[in-house]
């Protein structure tokens, strides 16, 4: 019995130590690569269950470079005495091109096994990356490959936890052929087809290439063209996007595509609303003017922002939009990358090839989207112009002063929630123009669709409540990383993009098409001090739709669930006809700022039950003495009298209610 047990243990030890065959699973990839002459095997077959040797990896490297014919015809010499005759031409080519050295002056190390890091170094070099130029190091080759999309998550895990086999060589080599070359939309196999190293028909047969006839035709002989690309889940995007191609795109020296995320400005469950706004943005909005001036293509996605899922601020790429478990709305950042890839292939198939990296722009919510996208995927962005970002661009650090900076305040947990390893060096290579208006009070900090309680508390603790304090603190933190964005605060500017600012945006993009980051001289507006803020607001009366004397225009403006909060006379009077004056506008903005910062309000019934309400704006109302009014949205509630209970802000902003809300039986009637 003891002998049987011992024999079983020996068998277990042998199969555990040497049972590589159980780990092989990529024979299909080896067969595909054999079809194009890249992976030919040995006299014993593919031998996928053993580690590759240095000489085998060297031969694969030459083939992936498309240099096999040159190597065999030129027969370059080399000093290595341990290279077998059948591989001498390959090693000679690598030695001549200074792409690979031996392990000694006359020893190549032909029979030594090749670790995963070393083979991935060959793969990255074939894709145009250079370890000698500082793109990556041998020790970081696997991590760099994952960040660049050369390796996916499961493959990375295999290569870092399992023995590296010829089985893995077949898989990663096949995937590399489908990977974009550095700074290009062209994938490696396309380059090999162009040099006649691989036959295009075979590349299509084994799934490395698609039939280009599937891409839409772009005809710009005499006019601009606007294409709508419908959603295609098989290509990785569940929503449509628009692609605008200016008629002079062929004459442009700027070979980048501009991408601006859509920003509907409201929640709506009707997809057509978001589609209409995205189409209007690409045809008549600011990004259209940028694309026309630079003669470059423009992409705008049609991502929805749903009323039924209002807390998911998709148009700002907030935290919820990254962590949501939804087949349609999940990972909009990756869906956008897939849209970009498809648009770039469409352009290339129409002889309008652009760089794999893109320009990005955005303002307000779309500015946040673009700004956060840069931190998540810096390897895909050449330059980004992002404005109205709430005075707090995402911080490219995991923690600050002992505080873990969760996304989207920082990048402290993007590995956990998005499986992304933040790449600071790539981030520092992106030219960024981040701008705000000095009079911009559009602070979304207290909006629950923008930030939840945990995020809000973290922002207040690390950056503070005042927008200008947050702006300077954000600049300090980002610059401490060595990143060099250009930060611009425009005087006498509210939440807007003025014509001169648009000129600056265009100039910044025009100036940043190379590896060197260029800052520009932005336009200088004259300085105007911000309007003094309200810190306390006393509400004397409440106006409902049925209140006697309210003007018909504002009665119609109020929805079924809206009321107007009328401040006591501490608010200046706006007379009829003066609603659009500079003084009235400043007054309204000061009130809106207060409403955003003063916190929530609740309606409390006679039993003490509370209903949450939202103060969402102001209006100048022609009613009696023509005061400014707050607009408050209320839930559907039973008829009765309700006390208004404020949740006063810790920032010192204070609601004072001297009246109750009376809801009649007709208030919610249409």
Image (cartoon, rainbow, N blue to C red):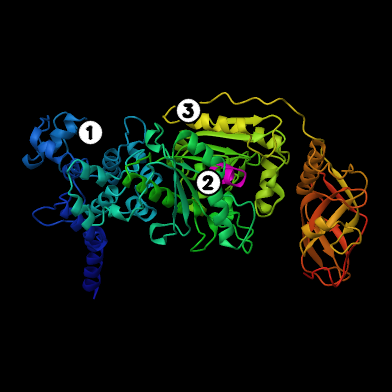
Q: Position of residue 103 (x, y in %)?
A: 20, 34
Q: Which residue is mark 2?
A: 283
Q: Does residue 645 appear left or right of residue 24 in this picture?
A: right
Closer to us: 226 or 207? 226
Query: Could you tell me which residue is drawn at 51 percent across and 63 percent down?
Result: 326
Q: Which residue is mark 3?
A: 511
Q: CA distance from mark 2 to mark 1?
A: 48 Å
User: Looking at this rendering, what residue extends furthest in the front direction?
Assistant: 222
Quadrant of the image for the N terminus?
Answer: bottom left
Q: Position of residue 449 (x, y in %)?
A: 66, 54
Closer to us: 371 or 585? 585
Q: Which residue is mark 1?
A: 99
Q: Is disc 2 in contact with disc 3, using a CB cutoff of under 8 Å? A: no
Q: CA distance from mark 3 to mark 1?
A: 34 Å
Q: Residues within 10 Å of mark 1 (few under 14, many from 20)?
A: some
Q: CA distance from mark 2 to mark 3?
A: 24 Å
Q: Is residue 85 above or below residue 659?
A: above
Q: What's the magenta region? A: 361-370
């Amino acid at each position: 019995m003891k002998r049987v047990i011992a024999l079983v243990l020996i068998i277990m030890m042998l199969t555990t130590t040497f049972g590589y065959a159980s780990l092989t699973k990529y024979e299909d990839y080896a067969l595909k690569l054999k079809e194009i002459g890249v992976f030919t095997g040995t006299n014993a077959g593919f031998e996928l269950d053993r580690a590759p040797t240095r000489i085998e990896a060297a031969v694969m490297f030459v083939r992936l470079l498309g240099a096999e014919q040159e190597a065999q015809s030129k027969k370059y010499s080399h000093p290595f005495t341990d290279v077998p005759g059948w591989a001498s031409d390959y090693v000679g080519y690598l030695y001549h091109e200074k792409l690979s050295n031996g392990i000694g002056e006359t020893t190549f190390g032909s029979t030594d096994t090749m670790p995963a890091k070393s083979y991935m170094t060959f793969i990255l070099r074939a894709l145009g990356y250079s370890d000698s130029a500082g793109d990556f190091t041998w020790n970081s080759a696997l991590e760099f490959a994952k960040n660049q999309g050369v390796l996916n998550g499961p493959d990375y895990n295999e290569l870092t936890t399992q023995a590296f086999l010829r089985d893995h060589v077949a898989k990663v080599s096949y995937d590399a052929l489908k990977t974009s070359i550095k700074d290009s939309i062209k994938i490696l196999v396309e380059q090999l087809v162009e040099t006649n190293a691989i036959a295009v028909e075979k590349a299509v047969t084994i799934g490395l290439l698609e039939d280009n006839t599937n891409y839409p035709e772009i005809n710009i002989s005499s006019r601009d063209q606007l294409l709508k690309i419908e959603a295609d889940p098989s290509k990785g995007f569940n929503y449509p996007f628009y692609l605008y191609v200016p008629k002079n795109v062929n004459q442009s020296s700027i070979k980048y595509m501009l991408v601006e995320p859509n920003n509907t400005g409201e929640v709506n469950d009707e997809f057509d609303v978001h589609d209409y706004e995205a189409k209007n943005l690409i045809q008549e909005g600011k990004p259209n003017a940028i694309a026309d001036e630079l003669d470059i293509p423009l992409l705008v996605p049609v991502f929805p922002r749903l009323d039924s899922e209002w807390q998911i601020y998709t148009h700002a790429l907030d935290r919820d939009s990254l962590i949501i478990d939804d087949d349609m709305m999940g990972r909009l950042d990756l869906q956008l990358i897939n849209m970009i890839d498809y648009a770039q292939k469409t352009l290339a198939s129409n002889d309008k090839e652009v760089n794999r990296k893109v320009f990005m722009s955005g303002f307000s919510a779309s500015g946040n989207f673009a700004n956060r996208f840069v931190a998540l995927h810096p390897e895909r962005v050449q330059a980004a112009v992002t404005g109205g970002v709430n005075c707090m661009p995402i911080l490219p650090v995991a923690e600050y002063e002992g505080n873990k900076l969760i996304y989207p305040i920082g990048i402290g947990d993007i590995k956990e929630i998005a499986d992304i390893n933040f790449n600071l060096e790539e981030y520092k290579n992106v030219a960024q123009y981040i701008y705000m208006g000095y009079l911009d009070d559009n602070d979304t900090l207290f909006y629950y669709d923008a930030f939840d309680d945990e995020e809000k508390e973290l922002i207040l603790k690390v950056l503070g409540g005042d927008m200008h304090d947050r702006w300077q603190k954000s600049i300090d933190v980002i610059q401490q990383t060595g990143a060099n964005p250009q930060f611009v605060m425009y005087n006498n500017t509210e939440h807007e993009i003025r014509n001169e600012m648009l000129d600056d945006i265009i100039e910044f993009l025009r100036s940043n098409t190379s590896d060197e980051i260029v800052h520009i001289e932005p336009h200088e507006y004259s300085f105007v001090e911000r309007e003094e803020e309200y810190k306390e607001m006393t509400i004397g009366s409440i106006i409902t739709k049925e209140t006697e004397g309210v003007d018909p225009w504002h009665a119609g403006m109020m929805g079924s669930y809206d009321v107007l909060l009328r401040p006591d006379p501490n608010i200046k009077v706006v007379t009829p006809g003066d609603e659009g004056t500079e003084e009235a506008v400043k007054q309204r903005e000061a009130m809106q700022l207060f409403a955003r910062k003063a916190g929530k309000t609740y309606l409390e019934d006679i039993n003490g039950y509370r209903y949450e309400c939202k103060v969402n704006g102001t209006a100048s109302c022609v009613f009696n003495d023509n005061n400014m009014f707050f607009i408050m949205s209320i839930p559907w509630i039973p008829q009765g009298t309700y006390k208004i209970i404020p949740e006063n802000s810790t920032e010192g902003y204070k609601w004072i209610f001297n009246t109750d809300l009376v809801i009649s039986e007709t208030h919610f009637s249409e």
